[in-house]
Amino acid sequence: MAAQSIVRQGTWWQVGNGRAIEICKDKWLHEPSTFRLTSQAIVVPSDAKVSLLINPHIAAWRTDTVQQFFSPDDAVAILSIPLSYRLPMDRLVWAYTPRGVFTVRSVYKVALSSCNNGLHGVCGLHLAPQIRAEN
């Protein structure tokens, strides 16, 4: 479905304890263009979790590990992500609202943007005039 791809496009992981987030596959960095690593990580298994980069005893990034395995740009992006001392569970958040909360209005704007950029989305749907007018 078109709506599922739009929702997938607009979500990213907010790091808590890092156990649910795959380093190389998932969107978890605060880089709005892709929310992913910009370069290939050195010697990191493709299914490795973000939790490997976190010291759970002090709720801090393993700075040496991050700087060793990632490009300087990615390392800066990773180390700039704040961690809670409680290390809560990771959670999916919506990237296109300030508080990370999904709204119909924000997903509609993402869908329109996808159409304008030539991507498949909800371009062919017939929408009520009041929905089109809110853009």
Image (spheres, grey):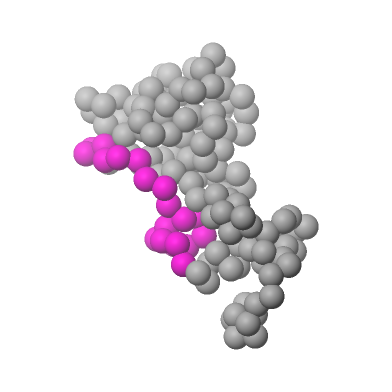
**Residue plotted at (78% across, 57% down):** 118
**Residue plotted at (58% across, 68% down):** 108
Q: Quadrant of residue 83?
A: top left
Question: Residue 111 at x, y = what percent?
Answer: 63, 63
Question: Residue 44 at x, y = what percent?
Answer: 51, 18
On-image quarter of the N terminus? bottom right
Q: How many marks?
A: 0
Compared with 78, 43 (above or below) is: above
Question: Residue 109 at x, y = what percent?
Answer: 60, 67
Query: Magenta: predominant secondary structure element?
Result: loop
Compared with 48, 16 (above or below) is: below
**Residue plotted at (52% across, 71% down):** 105
Q: Quadrant of residue 135?
A: bottom right
**Residue plotted at (49% across, 29% down):** 23
**Residue 113 relative to residue 26: left or right:** right
Compared with 37, 52 (above or below) is: above
**Magenta-drawn stretch contains 113:** no
Q: Is residue 110 visible?
A: yes
Q: Which one is in front, 9 or 32?
A: 9
Q: Quadrant of residue 57?
A: top left
Q: Which residues are magenta?
A: 85-103
Q: Which one is in front, 105 or 68?
A: 105
Question: Residue 116 at x, y = what percent?
Answer: 75, 64
> Most extreme residue toward the right, as rendered?
118
Q: Which one is in front, 4 or 133?
A: 4
